Every structure is written in C-alpha cells, then in structure tokens.
Image (cartoon, grey):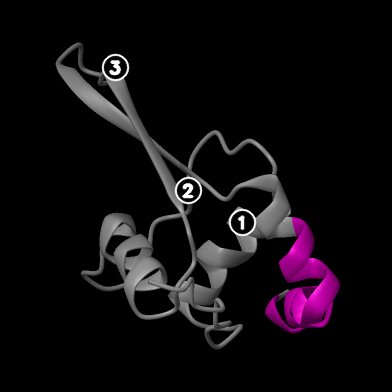
Amino acid sequence: MPRKTPIFPGPRTARGAVLAVLLSNTDQAGAEPLRGRVTLAAIVRALKRKYHWPIETTSFPSNAADGRATWATVYSLPPDVIDAALDEKGRDWLKAAS
C-alpha cells in the first residue's frame, strides 16, 4: 500500500499542539494537561490514522510518583519525516501554531 502524505491539523487544536511538539524534535519532560476528556494516546492515534503521520511509540516500565509500577510511553517522529515536513510547509504551520 502506498504511503499517504501527512496532513497538518488545525494549528490551534489539541492535535496541532501535539504535532508541534513532535515536529520540534526536542525531549519533553512532561505535557501540559489537555483540556477536556481527550487523552494524549487518542490524539496520537488520530494523528496516525486520520492525518497519516508515522508517529513511533515506545513504552517502558516506570514508577509513578506514589511508588506504583506503571508504563511510560514516548511518542516521536522519524528525523526524515520531520525534515520533509519542515521543508514543505511545516515552518509556516509551526509559526501559526505558536
């Protein structure tokens, strides 16, 4: 199946905010709480399925602040995808998102 071209969501949406972080290619220590009841995982799933972004997911065991065992998940975009997106119209889109 041919790879679909990623689509940029609205720059001032929750999906746009998450994509802006992924395109920045910087390490994130945490995320601002998302308004409403939408989880980060649901936003990433929409970016992958509806907007065709090849987001990579890595999960590993971690500890919660209260000592419970849990899983941490890291989302990222491959460097070549970031470069291609920024070369196309991503830089202008990022300016609109900030």
Q: Quadrant of residue 15?
A: bottom left
For disc 1, the neighbor class at 10 Å (few under 14, some 14 to 19, many from 20) is: some
93 displayed left or right of 37:
right
Decide which of tag 1 and tag 2 comes sooner along the chain: 1
Q: Residue at 21% of width from left, 69% of height from top?
A: 37
Q: CA distance from mark 1 to mark 2?
A: 10 Å
State whether residue 52 is above or below residue 41.
below
Task: Identify the mark nearer the N-term, 2 or 3.
Answer: 2
Q: Quadrant of the N terminus?
A: bottom left
Are the residues at dot 1 and dot 2 in contact (C-beta closer than 8 Å)? yes
Where does residue 67 sit, x and y in percent of width and height? 20, 11
Q: What residue is rendered at 72% in x and 69% in y? A: 85
**Residue named by callout 2:** 31
Which residue does the numbered mark 1 point to in the structure image? Answer: 21
Residue 28 lies, in percent from the top left, at 58, 39
Element at label 3? strand
Query: In the rendered image, which residue does mark 3 sit on?
Result: 62
Q: Secondary structure at mark 1?
A: helix
Q: Which residues are magenta?
A: 83-97
